[in-house]
Amino acid sequence: MGVSYCEFMGPLPIITEVPDDVDLAALESDLKDDGVAVLNPAHAGAKDDLAGVVQDAQAKGIENFKVIVLAHDYDPDTSLRDLGNQVAKDMGEKTTILTMSPSQVAGYSNGQLSRYQIEKGQDGYTGKLALHDPPKAAQDFVDVAHDATFPWAALTIALVLIVAALAGVARVLVCKQSRAVDAARRAAGLRSDAAPSAVEENGAIGAGSKE
């Protein structure tokens, strides 16, 4: 692979690798023009349609949306995300970048979209973007990512049910423990509250009267 960059996150640096056959300077210059960079000659005619998707994304509030179409796949496929990461850093602003190759895709956003939105966008409507059709793939990513919201309500309900279930289990365990303690005390000839029995009280009174 090509140029490696150290990204410090926490105590250890994370090494990112940008494809060595990509001219970063030329790519970033192309993106500044209309938000689109098509490096795959097979999709050169899709540039205008992709520029339209970029404008639609901006209208939906996904500002600084960029689309990169690479000529071939990479190994590892994380190189696509690394490329988007580096481009966003170089541009020095909040940016969302969709990088596509013939069978790989990676979304990256440094503050505009959540990781949840990006992952949902990468799945599109069918679980896989139509990468053979970059304009459709980019449009599906924008639409799905824009509409994706984390199911907080469902999560809250699930947590409430879990807490209630745990409380019920705890109550059952406490009751079982209490019954076990009472049974052990009875087996030892004592009442569960440790108070003297009526027989014991009468015996004590009778013994006193004899005196």
Image (cartoon, grey):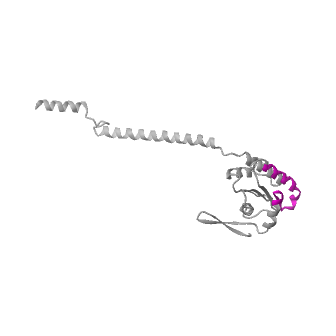
The magenta region covers: 32-58
| Image x and y of residue 85, in percent | 72, 61
Please indicate, yes or no, whether residue 137 appears anywhere in the rendered image: no
**Which quadrant is the N terminus positioned in?**
bottom right
Please indicate, yes or no, whether residue 209 appears anywhere in the rendered image: yes
| Image x and y of residue 138, in percent | 80, 52
Q: Is residue 56 magenta?
A: yes
| Image x and y of residue 113, in percent | 70, 52
Q: Give the side of residue 5 with respect to residue 133, left or right.
A: left
Identify the image quadrant of residue 97.
bottom right
Depth check: give the residue in front, 54 or 124: 54
Identify the image quadrant of residue 103.
bottom right
For image coordinates 81% across by 63% down, the residue present is 29
Residue occupying the far front of the picture: 93
Classify 201 as above or below 155.
Answer: above
For image coordinates 69% across by 68% down, the residue present is 5
For image coordinates 29% across by 40% down, the residue present is 188
| Image x and y of residue 55, in percent | 82, 51
Q: Is residue 55 magenta?
A: yes
